[in-house]
Amino acid sequence: MTTRTSAWEKALRYLLMLGVLAVTVGPFLWQLSTSLKSTTEDIYAYPPNLLPEQPTLDNYAGVADIIPVWRYALNSLQVAAANVVTNVVGASLAGYALARLRFRGRRIAGLAFVAALLVPLESIVIAQFTMMRDLQLNDTLIAVVLPGAIGALNVLLMRNAFANLPYEIEEAAVIDGANVWQRFVRVALPSVRGTLAVVAIFAFMGAWDDFLWPLIVLSDSDNFTLTVGLNFLHGTFQQNPRLVAAGTVIAVAPLLVMFACLQRYFFRGVGEGAVKG
């Protein structure tokens, strides 16, 4: 039995969709537009004009002249890439162990990862800083990577993905003589590529956008990540919002590129595992 949607219901849905887009995408479009406007244009004109009358890239060049934005971007890229590798490898191993292996304390280990999600970062940041200082890693990019090397949420995502795989697949591999590592690498991992993409995107975004921890642990400006470096742009040149907008677009661009490359796997990973077999 099918139900017909009335015209006013369709109109309401479109209005709600436009409202959500205006709230979520609108600020970024305004920042992008501002970053492309010259100094002769009024960025606060009403009604707002998103299309620059004289588009220019001078604001992006201005950001590079004020701060070493490309060096900061390279530092952020190193941190984000390391975070992706450690989370994909570590979360996969831990998730597979929690979902498919039988060992004493497995339930407690699973609860520990759930409990880790409930701990606010601000409550442990002092302990993390003290630990990095004792390890003599302060003011290094390694210290930026370590606290988020294996995220609890990523472990639970991988655990659920592996748990949803039919046991018959692994049983067939066992009959063929495959050991645990061979089942993990050749059977389980290829079946959860979508969730791996989700973990990779979350890890990259978390490391790239992180501001508080790099600000605390880094003191040498040569080691600053992009978010920390752009903070100086806000503080020193807040009278020029065009430069701030250009810096914001530079910071967001890699995230958009990565999501565009992995979005096919990202949406597949949401319900992965339930249809395997």
Image: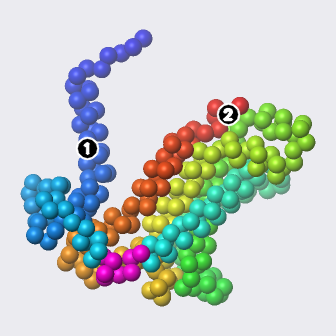
Q: Which residue is mark 1?
A: 19
The percent position of residue 46, horizontal first and vertical second, equals 8, 57
The percent position of residue 276, horizontal first and vertical second, equals 67, 33
Q: Is 225 on the left-hand or right-hand side of 145?
A: left
Tag 1's secondary structure?
A: helix
User: Label 1 vs label 2: CA separation?
Assistant: 37 Å
Magenta span: helix, strand or loop, mainly? helix
Q: Which residue is mark 2?
A: 276
**Residue 108 drawn in magenta:** no
The percent position of residue 196, horizontal first and vertical second, equals 61, 50
Q: Is 245 on the left-hand or right-hand side of 223?
A: left
Magenta residue span: 63-70
* Residue type, numbered disc 1: Gly
Whichever of labels 1 and 2 marks the residue nearer the N terminus, that label is 1
Which residue occupies 26% across, 34% down?
A: 14
Instruction: Examine the image and state in which quarter residue 131 appears.
Output: bottom right
* Residue type, numbered disc 2: Lys
Q: Is 25 on the left-hand or right-hand side of 273?
A: left
Q: Is 62 on the left-hand or right-hand side of 191?
A: left
The percent position of residue 154, horizontal first and vertical second, equals 60, 55
* 109, above or below 274, in the image: below
Quadrant location of the N terminus in the rendered image: top left
Which residue occupies 36% across, 75% down?
A: 230
